[in-house]
Image: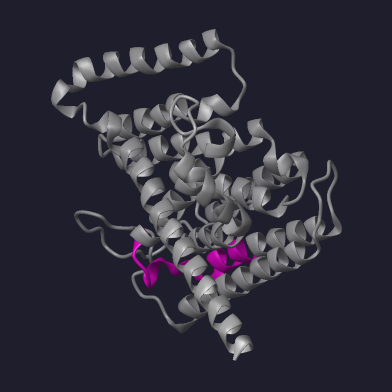
Amino acid sequence: MWLGILFSLIVTGMTWGLNRLFLTNIDLLPDRPGFWYAWQLRYPDFWTHFTAWTGYALHQITFWGIIYYAQKQNLRYSKGLHPINFIALGANAFFILLHLLQTTIWYDGLAQDVPEQTSQWSVILLLCMVLWMENQRRGLVFGKKVGFLTETGKVVRKYHGYYFAWAIVYTFWYHPMIFTSGHAIGFFYMFMLILQGSLFFTRIHVNKYWMAVQEVTVLIHAVLVSLMNADGMWPMFLFGFFGIFVVTQMYGLGLKAWQRYAFFALYAGGAIVVYADRGLNRLFELVTIPLTEYAVVFVLAALVWTGMKLTSRWQGSRENTLRLAEGD
């Protein structure tokens, strides 16, 4: 794990250096009002599209193939790495460097062809699925488990690797590997998620502290991007994700009661100070992100539950049909 983090820091430094050397005068599309991703070439060509999509496709297929192979091996969780983990780490390191090279030469990611919301929501759904899966271990609200989520969560735990691999790789290739404060923490976060995805069937993959770092880092990224964009929305991201931490995530860390109270006091005290100045009419920002994520968890669980029931009913009907056929 530590070597993976060191590699991530080195690549972040390489990104800064290559950007300074080769990407200082890039002709980008003019800025537009509203929801707009600015880091796109003004005049893309065949190769900018081809290299981004080819790199993404190869990375995606490779990662999915590795996950499929690992699951077929019926591996047990271990303290050390399995041979397939080394393959996953090496393959992902290769594609990270490939994307850096692709950005340096052709710049564009997938952003030219798909809206930014697809990248954002792919990660939002990932975070919601983590809340869903972890309900069995730490509960969803103040340590309390939701039974409805436990049953459906078994399905998600079995197949989550494929969705997580898609969300991470898709988001990774959506952005060109450029160095701004927002992109730097964003890509470092992607590197951490890729590292986590490569450590399947190891103890560190399910380490509660390591997983908490993965979840909380999104707070730092979101706040930095908001500050960089000067949109004034940073309190919503800060207290939104911090709220999810005090309501759900910290209950998976085995904290003592006074430690949980301290985190809640920090959250409440910070919110009082900020919104006393920001205005009570903005208090809805405190619950926007938590309510969105919790609502998505229940919607996803309902969809999976419906699919489970339909599948069970179909299998039961099929078995009855076979019995009748055998009786004839």
Looking at the image, the residue that sits furthest to the bottom is 328
Q: Residue at x 39, y 35 (%)?
A: 223
From which residue to which does the magenta span run? 98-116
Image: 44 above or below 162:
below
Q: Quadrant of the N terminus?
A: top right
Residue 268, position as x, y percentages in the image = 35, 15
166 or 253, which lies in front?
253
Residue 285's x, y, as percent? 25, 32
Q: How is the image coloured?
A: one colour
Is residue 180 in sight in this rendering? Answer: no
Q: Is residue 303 above or below residue 226?
A: below
* Direction from residue 328 to residue 282 in the image, left or right: left
Of residues 89 and 132, the one nearer the viewer is 132
Q: Position of residue 309 (x, y in %)?
A: 46, 62
- Quadrant into which the C terminus falls: bottom right
Instruction: Give the residue drawn at x 25%, y 55%.
Output: 35
Residue 71, quarter of picture = bottom right
Residue at the farthest front position: 327
